[in-house]
Amino acid sequence: MAGRKLVATTAQVGDLLRAVVGEAGADNGATVESLLGEGIDPHTYKLTRSDTVRLLAADAIFYNGLLLEGKMADALQRLAADGRPVTAVGDALPRERLLQPAGFEGSFDPHIWMDVSLWRAALAVVRDRLSQLYPQDTARFHDNAAAFDAVLDRLDGYARTVLGSVPAPQRVLVTAHDAFSYLGRAYGVEVVGIQGISTESEAGLRRIEELVALLADRKVPAVFVETSVSERNVRALVDGAAARGHTVAIGGSLYSDAMGAPGSYEGTYVGMIDHNVTTIARALGGEAPAGGFQGRLPGRA
Ligand code: ZN
């Protein structure tokens, strides 16, 4: 498959492709591009003309699916209907492993990368689909996927350990929108988003009041902002808690739907998850090693 061009929507899916095919320039590697950069919100992002050009030039297209890419899904489905190899990774996962958000009967929570064990299943989907498209490279895809899967297995264990070190009553993750339910299910954290499953709805005043009461009652020390979502609602929560005499810190900025800068550690899937779980554990009163999962995070500030 040398010389092939693969295009992903999210950087998370692009990271999976890179792990399975290997970098361009390496033996038989391919070019992998992600359309959604640092800080970009996939729920509301609309394809640009240059994105469309890149999609049309791709040999194969991979996207998250499960309606994450709300404004892109039609275009992606049209490309698939035209006979292009388009794969929605999340839609190929076993339904019984997916969460159905309350009030959204028949649809599934798309934030599947937040549970590392579920992302390992996504890795297998990508490996099998690439093997189907480029059968001559099947053995290499399997070797690469197995190597990455071993890293993910250790990362999953790390997340469980550091989040498990947070005292139980404070194991509450309050963030701007509902992107962390899979993390909550996998690692035993109660997860509360100020906004719903998408970033499109507005958070009402009553929602803020409810959350202020929760934070004060449970003595939750910190709430979190997200790199791809406005901080406004989180700030309102911190101010509301202060007015009730409960000091809540902003525990850090989490990578919810977008990864960090390309080329940085947080611009990889492993770095993104390491940053998130390490930041959450520390801010909520748990323990995490100074450099995180593999010594590559900046030490405690
Ligand atoms: Zn989201």
Image (tube, helix red, strand yellow):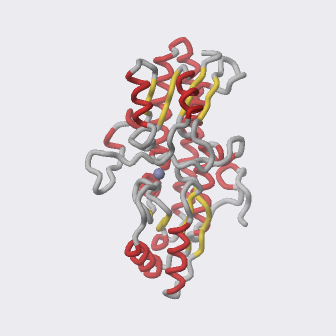
Q: In this rendering, does residue 198 appear at all?
A: yes
Query: Residue lying farthest left?
Result: 105
The residue at the point 71 percent across, 60 percent down is: 290
Q: Position of residue 133 (x, y in %)?
A: 48, 17
Q: Is residue 29 above or below residue 189?
A: above
Q: Position of residue 141 (x, y in %)?
A: 56, 23
State the count of labels. 0
Quarter containing the N terminus: top right
Q: Determine whether, in the image, residue 26 is placed left or right of residue 71.
A: right
The residue at the point 54 percent across, 79 percent down is: 239
The residue at the point 59 percent across, 74 percent down is: 249
Query: Residue lying farthest top?
Result: 136
Q: Is residue 3 above or below residue 109?
A: above
Quarter containing the C terminus: bottom right
Image quarter of residue 33 = top right
Image quarter of residue 193 = bottom left
Q: Where is residue 103 in the image (x, y as percent from the top left)?
A: 28, 56
Query: Residue lying farthest front?
Result: 49
The residue at the point 54 percent across, 40 percent down is: 10
Q: In this rendering, does residue 190 appear at all?
A: no
Q: In this view, does 136 lie above or below 233?
A: above
Q: Where is residue 87 in the image (x, y as percent from the top left)?
A: 44, 28
